[in-house]
Amino acid sequence: MVQPQGMFTHVVGTMDLFCFASRTERNIRIGIENRLWAVSTLLNQQTMAARRTRARLYFREGACGLLYCNPTHSFTTPFVALSKADPDRVVTEVWPEPWCLPFDIEPLGNLSKQIAAEDAKERWPILQQRLARINARGGVSAAMNMTGTTVFARVPISTQDWELILRDLAVK
C-alpha cells in the first residue's frame, strides 16, 4: 500500500484531506480503474480560476483524498495522490464528459465499501465537528469542502480521523 507522503502537517498528529464528489458511481469506477481523478469543468471562469489556485497552492503528491458518491449519499474510496493536479490538461478520453485538473491516484478502496453520510456523521468525529461549525448548513458537502466552489480546499483532520476513514473504507 502506498503511504501518504508530504502531508501538510500543521501540528503534530494532523494532516489535510481533500474530498471530491461524483455525480455517478460509474465515474468513480472509471477513476479507480484508470487510477486517475479530476474535477468537472465549469463555465464560470472565476470559479475555475479559484479551483486552479487552490490546487496549485494546497494539493500535492502524497495528499490524502476521499471520494463521495452523490447518488448514494455515501463516502467511498480513500486514496493517495500520486501527482499534483495538472492545471493545463483537460481529460476527454476517460470519462463521458471532459474533466480538468487531473491527477494520478493510488486507490485504497473501491465501490464495494461505502459508508452512508448519515452513518459517517455518527462514526467520524471530524464530520461531527465540521457540521457543528457550520450549523449543518449545506450538509456533508459543505462540511467536507466538496461543493463546486470549495473543490481543492483542504480539510484539516487528525491522523486518528484518517485511520477511522481507512478502517471503514480501505480494502488494501
Image (spheres, helix red, strand yellow):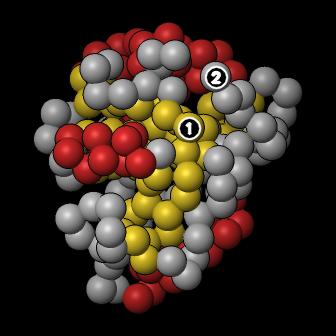
Residue 89 versus residue 47: which sits nearer the camera?
89
In the picture, measured across the screen, residue 13 lies left or right of residue 136, that is: right
Question: The N terminus is located in which quarter?
Answer: top right
Q: In which image quadrant can residue 44 be found?
A: bottom left
Reading the image, the residue beneath label 2 is 1
Point out which mark residue 106 bears: 1
Please give left or right for residue 150 compared with residue 71 in the image: right
Residue beneath the point at 29% across and 28% down? 111
Q: Is residue 62 visible?
A: yes
Residue 34, numbered label: none
In the rendered image, the vertical position of residue 104 relative to residue 97, given as above or below? above
Q: Residue 83 appears at what percent x and percent y?
A: 66, 55
Above or below: residue 150 compared with residue 35: below
Closer-to-camera residue (48/34): 34
CB within 8 Å, label 1 to label 2: yes
Farthest-out residue, left: 71
Q: Give whichever of 24, 132 is nearer the camera.
A: 24
Query: Looking at the picture, how far across and down is residue 38, in whole percent?
Result: 43, 60
Q: 165 left or right of 17?
A: left
Q: Amino acid at mark 2?
A: Met
Q: Secondary structure at mark 1?
A: strand
Of pointers 1 and 2, the one earlier in the residue sequence: 2
Residue under the image location 23 percent in, 69 percent down: 97
Position of residue 39 measured from the top left corner of the image (x, y, whole percent):
39, 63
Give the residue type at disc 1: Glu
Question: Does 146 appear above or below 57?
Answer: above
| Quarter where residue 42 is shown | bottom left
Dot 1 crowding, Cα within 10 Å, few <14, some 14–19, many 20+: many
Residue 92 place in picture, x, y as percent: 33, 73
Q: Measure the alpha-carbon separation of dots 1 and 2.
A: 8 Å
Viewer-proximal residue among 38 and 157: 38
